[in-house]
Image (tube, coloured by chain):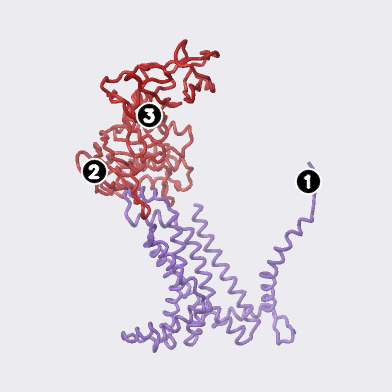
Chain colours: A purple, B red
Amino acid sequence: MRKTTNQKAWWLVVPVLLLVAFNAFIPLMTVVNYSVQETFGNNVFFWEGVTWFEKVLRSERFHDSMLRQLLFTGMIIAIEVPLGIAVALSMPRKGPWVSVCLVLMALPLLIPWNVVGAMWNIFALPDIGLLGYSLNSMGFDYNFTQQPVSAWMTTVVMDVWHWTSLVVLLCYAGLCSIPDAYYQAAHIDGASRWAVFRYIQLPKMKRVLTIAILLRFMDSFMIYTEPFVLTGGGPGNTTTFLSIDLVKIALGQFDLGPAAAMSLIYFLVVLLICWVFYTVMMRNEEQ
Amino acid sequence: MSRIEFKDVRHAYPPPPGQAPVYALKEVSQVWEHGGAYALLGPSGCGKTTLLNIISGLLTPSEGSILFDHREVTDLPTAGRHIAQVFQFPVVYDTMTVFDNLAFPLRNRGIPEARVRERVAEIADMLDLSDRLRQRASGLTADGKQKISLGRGLVREDVNAILFDEPLTVIDPHLKWQLRSKLKELHQQIGVTMIYVTHDQVEALTFADQVVVMHDGGIVQVGTPVELFNRPKHTFVGYFIGSPGMNVLPCRLENGQPVFANNPLSSDYPADTDLSGKLEIGIRPEFVRFGDHGIPVEIDKVEDLGRYQVVTVRHESEQIKMLVGENQAIPSESPKIQFDPANLHIYRDDWAVGARDA
């Protein structure tokens, strides 16, 4: 049988192509465009090659904010994932309390980033905020606007408060998908509580945990609004994470070239880490 | 190993708010003798699994008590009962190898590693899993996984009983036969009490010495496969066992004798039997034949099943199934049927009349 060739079908791809072009490709290429040129306005550009990339990669400022970023992301994942699993394990599996718990858990997720930042800012103020005032009256010297350690702790606790729920909900969904027979079989096999967690619950949660960690990594690695509203990146530069730094360079100093180069490096780092993490997790799965 | 006794056990699952509890298990008193091979037979939802879970301690009954060797164990948790149980759908620990899966129940009980290796090798050999012991359990097919579940039940030596909850549902037919005879063989070898839940009568009848038929949350009859076939105590047993099942037909009482279609029927039951209430007769299709005289019927349908034919005949509105040999002619003009009196049973309110315990 002869197949009829009809190239008109290609037109059907056009909408998708346009969509991808306008929402991803063209904006990205604009950034690429800035990253290899120098401009002084008036649409006059000078070719710079990889100068900006070299400059960014060599700058201590970039190194510092990258380190702060890695530290922050590492800390919140190290706290949120175990905490999320623990909370999910202790949530009821059936009964009227299920919906109560789910709603309570979902609440922080519904609050916009800048509101969370503002809330915690006021909450933590040492003179009038409930948290700040209580800590100080208990004898702790706490002032997040002046002490780097306090600022860090407040930022981390705020993120944990805002996003642990996401891990909880994902883990809870994973736990709920385990058939009763597994627990019954474990009972019959005389498995301890730890063995049930290690050999039944954890393996069954693996997929959702992979997603949870990926989401939390990406989100926290790109965090901007909350620390910006809470500390503004201070005191000094102690809570200036990558995106805050990026905005400072791009919009504060209007250094479009270095900012564009930094965005691309930033983007590639996120992509690389996600890819490595996902590949490793999936390879384990296959074995 | 021990004798398991149920004393007036009843169980209801927690009802939805505002509703009265419904008993999934209604008043069961039953003794499972040490070393017996029992089958629990009944349709879905009749309480078989509930009963099994009560034995293993996964469920605590709402009322009544369970005794192992005359020792009360009703409140004893699963771990203390030394019961192995295999579930309908395979349960394997995905991250472990086949070996570790089989060793899991032993290791949890602190059995020395050398003994664990011995036992696992033995069981793996029995289930044809020896060449896959190093493989990850998650990579196996459904029946491979179910073999692991079976293996985990069989590997322990300290068990009082092994319970099987429809374990062969997911297994291919040809493997089913193989595994079932393996279980039977195993039972003869190790002599541990086995209770096998199924809704498949062939499975029950081939596996068990004693078949326990359950219906609507209660045990209706316990007996050997032959007893269940020849002397069904309850109409349910009659039509659940046998293929096609027993004909159950309404009958009237005339001068103290049951009558169906103006045909007085004789059946041996004590003369002083109370025959008030809903009265029915039960006759298996095997014991209905065509004859010169008897009950006039019309022929509805003839199904040829090879070795025999299933003939569906009708008297007025009552359908009657009968088995006819493959070479036997089916009368075409005004057929009449007769019931074999020796195999005719009378049921009053669904229960067989008279002391018919074999």
Of tags 2 and 1, which is closer to the observer? 2
Which quarter shows the C terminus of chain B? Answer: top left
Q: Residue furthest front?
A: B255
Q: Residue at x 29, y 32 (%)?
A: B36
| Residue assigned mark 3 | B235
Crowding around mark 1 (Cα neighbors within 10 Å: few <14, some 14 to 19, many 20+) is few
Label 3 in the same subunit as label 2: yes
Is B274 situated above or below A257? above
Q: Earlier in the sequence, mark 3 or mark 2?
A: 2
Q: Tell me the distance, in whole angstroms, between the alpha carbons under discs 3 and 1.
A: 65 Å
Label disc, if present, on residue B65 of the rendered structure: 2
Are discs 3 and 1 located on one and the same chain? no
Please, what is the three-letter code of the amino acid marked with disc 2? Ser
Q: Is residue B209 visible?
A: no
The residue drawn where x is 24% and y is 48% is B76
Badge 1 element:
loop
- Residue A7 image offset from top left, x and y in percent: 79, 55
Hey, what amino acid is under mark 3?
Thr
The chain ID associated with circle 3 is: B
Residue designated by label 1: A3
Mark closer to the observer (3, 2): 3
Q: Residue A87: x and y, percent?
A: 39, 65
* Secondary structure under the numbered disc 3 in the rendered image: helix
